[in-house]
Image: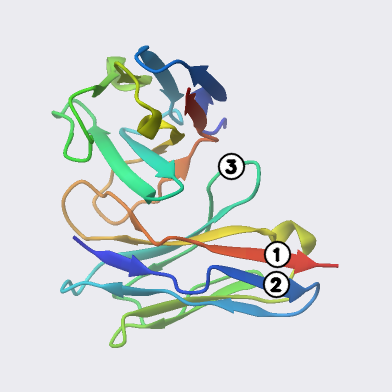
Amino acid sequence: GAGVSQSPSNKVTEKGKDVELRCDPISGHTALYWYRQSLGQGLEFLIYFQGNSAPDKSGLPSDRFSAERTGGSVSTLTIQRTQQEDSAVYLCASSFGTVNGDTQYFGPGTRLTVL
Amino acid sequence: AQTVTQSQPEMSVQEAETVTLSCTYDTSENNYYLFWYKQPPSRQMILVIRQEAYKQQNATENRFSVNFQKAAKSFSLKISDSQLGDTAMYFCAFRPPYGNNRLAFGKGNQVVVIP
């Protein structure tokens, strides 16, 4: 079936604006992850959704970052009042969410550039 | 938090030759999961191979194989018969056996296959 999809592919915004990034996980995957990939920091975990449980937000870098997952499927990552240091590639991944080390499958990412 | 270290930032290899990428990690856990992901210029993170720590046998996937040394906390990737399409960033990742299944990534190795 289809893989993880993300939109937009690229986003250029001005400092101070809000942005929304979208992720469509693989059908049937109950777990969804957001990661950030930046030049200086490598790949960082941001947030994790598993089914109907409360999300693990422990990786979000500030309260300007938030994420939702509607109906257990599509997720939106929102960055408010963007700053230049938010420029990065934002990667979404999904998995079956089983206990025994299930594999995460990644989308192509959204490259965010904050001017 | 687990630390994953990849110490060879860029490597070049002739087509059809073999290249080995090193990865070490730090954990006090006994059961965990290790992964190698490939990220070509398209930005898509693609799973190359995975290893369960409780398995002594090294994982193999076609031209890709690992040398898993649990006591040394080492997890190297060998690419045999390198092909031009293997040109990519390669990331080593660790997943603990509990919690939110988040992946801890190394900084990555750039592999360039030369014709």
To which chain does the residue with label 1 belong?
B
Secondary element at image label 1: strand
Q: Residue at x 57, y 30 (%)?
A: A2
As drawn, A24 above or below A95: above
Residue A56: image x %, image y %? 17, 36
The kind of residue tagged 3 is: Arg
Which residue position is annotated with label 3?
A: B43
Dot 2 lies on which element?
A: strand
**Residue A32 versus residue B103 in the image, above or below:** above
Q: In the rendered image, which residue does mark 1 sit on?
A: B112
Residue at mark 3: chain:
B
| Residue ID at (27%, 66%) | B3
Which element type, helix, strand or loop, lies under badge 3?
Answer: loop
**Same-chain status of marks 2 and 3:** yes
Q: Of A56 and A83, which appears nearest the observer?
A: A83
- Which circle marks residue B12 in the picture? 2
Neighbourhood count class around disc 3 (C-alpha, 10 Å): few under 14, some 14–19, many 20 upward = some
**Quarter of the view holding residue B12:** bottom right
Q: Is residue B85 above or below residue B56?
A: above
3D distance between C-alphas at marks 2 and 1: 5 Å
Mark with earlier residue (1, 3)? 3
Query: What is the spatial separation of the Cα atoms under label 2 and label 3, in whole angstroms?
Result: 20 Å
For the image, the number of numbered tags is: 3
Judge depth for marks 2 and 3 and give the one in front: 2
Cα–Cα span, label 1 and label 3: 15 Å
